[in-house]
Image (spheres, rainbow, N blue to C red):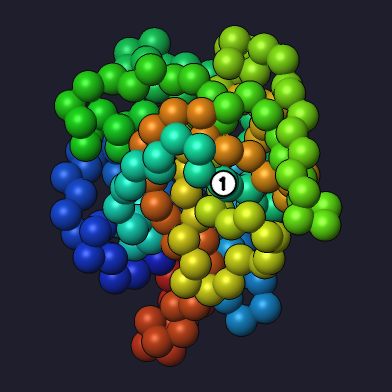
Amino acid sequence: MAYYLKDLPFTEEGKMLKLSDEDRERFRLVYKREGDGWVLHDIYEKGGEYGEDCIVVPLESTYKGYTYIDEGKIFRNVKGTTNDPMPINPNTGYEYHSWIGLWKQMYYQTTGTNPICVCCTDGKVYETSDRVEYGEDLKGCQNTGLIVGGHVIRRKRYKSVNVGDLVYIVPICMSHDHIKIKKYMKTGQKTFAVKLNYKIIPQNYLARHPLETHEKI
């Protein structure tokens, strides 16, 4: 069972979120221990298999706002954050406990309109060899019907994600979500992106509130 750090301080952006009680319950985030820090792992689901190497935190504690990524911008997948699409809640139209559900909710909360959910890529996959760019088409990616919330970084050259780095959640088809991290993609249109802290080190908080003093869920 994971430790629930429900009182972990909110980010400045998180303080401005006006989540309903239902959304606050739906979008608790799971971080898994990696070295001295914690890595974004999952959206919490009651009954999920999380060990004592995991902490659950409110979305407001790691939310860094939103941005728009212009057409033609480069991005890469982040390793280890792919989840299968979840079933849709017929009452809300959003996926249960899913990254694409979170993306849709933040889009609606920001713009006041429901998003059109298509793969944000230009349909290709790129790799760099001796500074020469090659493109590979993934036919039909816009029409797969399976759009997930992909975790991406905005870099042409691959490098590991460090503590405090931003990760962006964008709508992406399953084919592009499974592209290996050493290849990159480009946005096919201006894209709304949710910003989260990928790695956190809550040592100061845990020094005052050790893990074993928190509720397990």
132 in relation to 45, above or below: below
Picture coordinates of residue 5 (x, y %)?
40, 66
The one of 156 and 110 positioned closer to us in this rendering: 156
Q: Is residue 7 left or right of residue 181?
A: left
- What residue is drawn where x is 64% and y is 18%? 141
Q: Is residue 111 left or right of 173 when viewed as pictured?
A: left
Estimate the x, y position of residue 90 in percent, counting from the top left.
39, 11
Residue at x-position 36% and y-position 36%: 192
Residue 213 quadrant:
bottom left
The residue wearing badge 1 is 74
Q: Quadrant of residue 68?
A: top left
Mark 1 nearby-residue class (10 Å; few <14, some 14–19, many ≥20): some
Circle 1 — which element? strand
Give me the residue at 54% from left, 24% from top.
Answer: 119
Q: Which residue lies at the image location 67% right of the left edge and 67% below the top edge?
A: 160
**205 sits to left or right of 124:** left
| Quarter of the image with the N terminus in it | bottom right
Q: Position of residue 36 (x, y in %)?
A: 61, 81
Q: Is residue 150 above or below residue 167?
A: above
Give residue 206's quadrant in the image. bottom left
